[in-house]
């Protein structure tokens, strides 16, 4: 297996123009993200034809879809090959290309969502783990298999719920880091919001409520403290910086947070929560269909991670999240479409690509199917969206909701409200079936798959 990953890394490096053309690289859950020095030297068609590559996306970086698990091992081998090639200063090259990349992707809304995504993406493993432990332990307790007062139940509840009690601190750390501030001060911005001691403070005739403003308030405070820190540092002698700068930044941010950011964050949070709930209440199955059907295009842009604070704010405000099960149907429609293509095509290479990506898709990681199968083929991507819309309508009709944030697909069933699990799974199967039927009947002909010959 190690040799296979090394060979795949070698082929990728060759098609990317060699080690000297690599400015920087990293990986996420499914993609090897590479910034080339000279994009003209990259053979994108050659990369797509390498066995093991599920797709290629061009955004701020060149993103090569390899699939979960696989991408980590290939990235390790890729790094070894780059390092072994000579004195390559990745940091300097990344800096040299940063300005050009920023100009290409300088749409304000796009940049804003990417900033938000960059804050929450590093938290996803912790959110998934905590959500699953919380969901499974709650299901076991409510099924009567474990006494809620037992030590084991308390241990499981504490392990699973700890993150959500202190999530504001982690969000503050990442937000400050993203905006050029000290991570520790960002963590303090989170503490300012969630500290139980603020319940003793009364401003303008009203007592402050710990947690008021939620993650929106934390984001505002963390970004603010980073900006204040940078500006104060300009006027402070270097010898006094470690003492004066953080002290002034924290003091100013603390006052502004309690007077402005907590009430403002609360207003924004209420608007988001009430707005989404109103859309689902008034729109019903139509709203569910539209939300489910339009989620996949958002995934294509990579901006779907920007919705993470919305999911978390719903859970913080009303106790569960009715949006996530609807959006999770995007991946389910994709799975159904992939099954239809698999049964209809006679191309062995396409069957191999689908066979490798389907398990991940059913487990909630849909990017290999999107970028490796349906999006390159064109029409199947649209029929997958229609299938997702049908599943989304079902989830909206029965008001299915989750108690935490996690990956979609089958694993999401573990964090769905107890009593709604079977309904969620029924909606998942309906989205599979709708994606399959739409694609089998209208979405795919074998001649579309010329690149898989």
Image: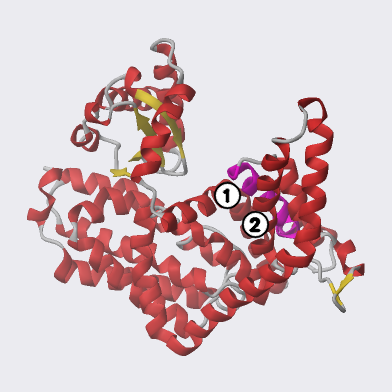
Q: Residue at x 41, y 30 (%)?
A: 74
Outermost residue to the front = 235
Q: Which residue is mark 2?
A: 219
Q: Residues within 10 Å of mark 2 (few under 14, many from 20)?
A: many
Q: Which color mode does the image show?
A: secondary structure
Q: Is residue 34 magenta?
A: no
Q: Residue at x 66, y 55 (%)?
A: 130
Where is residue 441, by image quadrant? bottom left
Q: In the rendered view of the protein, which quadrant contains the N terminus?
A: top left
* Residue closer to the observer: 38 or 380: 38
The answer to whether residue 1 of the structure is visible from this angle is: no
The extreme top residue here reads: 86
Secondary structure mostly seen in magenta is helix
Q: Which residue is mark 1?
A: 119
Circle 2 SS class: helix
Q: Residue furthest bottom?
A: 282
Left/right of residue 349 with respect to residue 19 in the rendered view: left
Which of the numbered marks, if any, corresponds to residue 162?
none
Q: Position of residue 391 (x, y in %)?
A: 38, 75
Residue 308 screen position, x and y as percent: 54, 60
The C terminus is located in which quarter? top left
Mark 1: few/some/many CA within 10 Å (<14, 14-19, 20+): many
Left or right position of 41 against 246: left
In magenta stretch: residue 177: yes
Tell me: residue 103, above or below residue 135. Answer: above
Residue 335 locus on image (x, y percent):
33, 61
Residue nearest the viewer, comparing 414 with 262: 262
Label 1: which secondary element? helix
Q: Are marks 2 and 1 in contact (CB under 8 Å)?
A: yes
Say whether residue 258 is visible.
yes
Q: Write the start and end of the magenta stretch as one range.
A: 160-179
Residue drawn where x is 73% and y is 51% of the image: 169
């Amino acid at each position: 297996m190690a040799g296979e990953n090394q060979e795949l890394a070698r082929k990728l490096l060759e098609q990317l123009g060699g080690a000297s053309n690599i400015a920087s690289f990293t990986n996420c859950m499914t993609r090897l993200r590479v910034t080339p020095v000279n994009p003209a030297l990259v053979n994108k068609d050659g990369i797509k034809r390498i066995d093991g590559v599920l797709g290629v996306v061009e955004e701020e970086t060149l993103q090569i879809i390899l699939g979960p698990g696989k991408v980590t091992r290939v990235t390790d081998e890729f790094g070894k090959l780059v390092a072994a090639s000579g004195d390559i200063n990745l940091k300097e090259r990344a800096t040299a290309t940063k300005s050009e990349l920023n100009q290409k992707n300088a749409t304000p809304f796009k940049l804003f969502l990417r900033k938000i995504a960059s804050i929450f993406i590093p938290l996803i493993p912790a959110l998934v783990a905590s959500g699953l432990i919380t969901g499974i332990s709650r299901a076991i307790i409510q099924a009567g298999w474990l006494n809620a007062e037992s030590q084991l139940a308390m241990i499981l509840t504490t392990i699973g719920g700890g993150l959500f009690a202190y999530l504001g601190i982690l969000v503050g750390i990442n937000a400050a880091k993203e905006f050029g501030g000290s991570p520790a001060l960002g963590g303090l911005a989170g503490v300012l919001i969630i500290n139980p001691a603020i319940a003793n403070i009364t401003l303008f005739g009203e007592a402050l409520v710990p947690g008021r403003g939620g993650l929106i308030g934390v984001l505002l405070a963390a970004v603010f403290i980073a900006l204040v820190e940078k500006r104060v540092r300009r006027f402070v002698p270097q010898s006094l910086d470690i003492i004066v700068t953080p002290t002034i930044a924290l003091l100013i941010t603390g006052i502004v947070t309690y007077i402005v950011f907590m009430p403002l964050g609360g207003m924004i949070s209420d608007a988001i929560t009430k707005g989404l709930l109103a859309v689902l209440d008034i729109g019903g199955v139509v709203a569910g269909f539209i939300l489910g059907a339009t989620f996949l295009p958002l995934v294509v842009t990579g901006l779907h991670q920007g919705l993470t604070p919305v999911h978390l704010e719903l859970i913080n405000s009303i106790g569960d999240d009715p949006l996530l099960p609807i959006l999770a149907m995007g991946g389910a429609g994709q799975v159904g479409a992939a099954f239809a293509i698999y049964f209809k095509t006679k191309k062995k290479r396409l069957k191999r690509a689908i066979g490798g990506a389907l398990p991940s898709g059913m487990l909630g990681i849909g990017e290999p199917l999107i970028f490796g199968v349906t999006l390159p083929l064109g029409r199947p991507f649209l029929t997958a969206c229609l299938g997702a819309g049908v599943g989304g309508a079902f989830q909206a009709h029965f008001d299915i909701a989750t108690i935490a944030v996690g990956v979609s697909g089958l694993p999401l069933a573990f964090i769905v409200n107890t009593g709604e699990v079977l309904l969620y799974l029924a909606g998942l199967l309906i989205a599979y079936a709708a994606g399959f039927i739409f694609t089998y009947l209208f979405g795919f002909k074998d001649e579309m798959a010329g690149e898989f010959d």
